[in-house]
Amino acid sequence: MKILHVITSLRTGGAEKLMVDLLPRLKALGHDVDLLLFDGVRTPFKDSIVSLGINVFSFSEGESVYNPIHILRLRRLLSHYDIVHTHNYAPQFFAAIAAIGKSIKLITTEHGGSNRRRSHRWFAPIDRWMYSRYDKVICISKKAEENLRGYIGECKSDISTINNGVDVEKYASAEPSPELESIAPGARKIIMVAGFRWEKDQDTLIKSLNYLPDNFHLFLVGEGARRPELEKLSATEGVTHRVHFLGLRTDVPQLLHAADYVAMSSHFEGLSLSSVEGMSVGKPFLASDVDGLREVVTGAGILFPHQDAESFANEIINLDNDRNRIVEISKLCRSRARQFDISAMADGYYQSYSYLK
């Protein structure tokens, strides 16, 4: 079966990471898989997926992903594939339009559990039409499916859940990177891996440093439009020397192993791949008590109140003073991560494609 996956770019994020992990596995299962990027700027994720043998092509480099000319470009491609599988809003919406009058099977993956667009109710009729154009809508968690159904109401599309997954063994077996220790020798190290976007709320972790002893340092892995804002916040909070921006990285498993604590302070998630990756390394994982994190972390890691920097700091201090609890939570986190191994996710997608034959 010939399948085209379409995504905005491979800059950074959970959906983008999913392409790197999932597509080679679908190819190994016998599918002919290509990847189309609206913005084909070179990134570590793009280099990685090309090196894994996936055919990647793009409409532009640096051009707006919302350029309506992409609809015409996409329409010309559709007849070459059995299934077109979209990710993120611009590809979702443009493919729904481009496929009008075409006998093509459409699938989309809904990666978010919520977003700011849904707070504007006048988007709902547009989105309801868009999702109705798809033969199948895959949500990355039960909560994401619940939120989507509540938002669009009745929809003729087949909506189901396939939990996001990661290559747990790849993360569990990685060797610690020496880089964090070279940056902050002897420090207690907290790490967060996420794009610098509003919904990720790195702000709370930066602010928490003022409630933690001076030997605690924060390492932020990722890039995005909010980096200057976060750097300014670090200066305003007087913790610039304790916040380290590591940029986009391909050695995330090694960096996670080098940290003492892994955190995720998002406002919301669909089902956070970064949280599963963080739990895979067997370190204590702390997350804000919000949709998409709550269902992964409850009963394994530690949930702290949303946007509460002081509570986060108190949880870290309590852990740091209780070695037995650190060991217990680390074991629970690794065990929970194995429930989200990527092999189960790949099988789920394979079955979804087979269903549409």
Image (cartoon, helix red, strand yellow):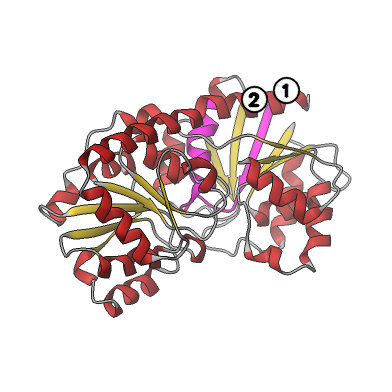
For the N terminus, which image quadrant? top right
Identify the residue shown where x is 83% and y is 47%. Answer: 132
Task: Based on the picture, tell me whether residue 20 belongs to the magenta stretch.
Answer: yes
In front of the other: 238 or 325: 325
Indicate left or right for 77 with 189 as reference: right
Indicate left or right for 214 with 139 as reference: left
Identify the residue shown where x is 76% and y is 53%. Answer: 150
C-alpha separation, residue under disc 1 versus residue under disc 2: 6 Å
The image shows residue 87 at horizontal and vertical percentages of 63, 47
The circle on residue 350 is 2
Indicate left or right for 23 with 49 as reference: right
The image shows residue 156 at horizontal and vertical percentages of 87, 42
Q: How would you rate the neighbour count of disc 1 (Cα within 10 Å): few for under 14, some for 14-19, many for 20 or more?
A: few
For badge 2, the amino acid type reads Tyr
Residue 192 against residue 281 in the figure, above or below? below
The image shows residue 310 at horizontal and vertical percentages of 34, 66
Identify the residue shown where x is 58% and y is 36%. Answer: 163
- Where, by quadrant of the figure, is residue 158 drawn? top right
Task: Based on the picture, tell me whether residue 17 belongs to the magenta stretch.
Answer: yes
Magenta segment: 1-26
Q: Secondary structure at mark 1?
A: helix
Identify the residue shown where x is 66% and y is 55%. Answer: 89
Q: Which residue is mark 1?
A: 354
Residue sitting farthest toward the right:
101
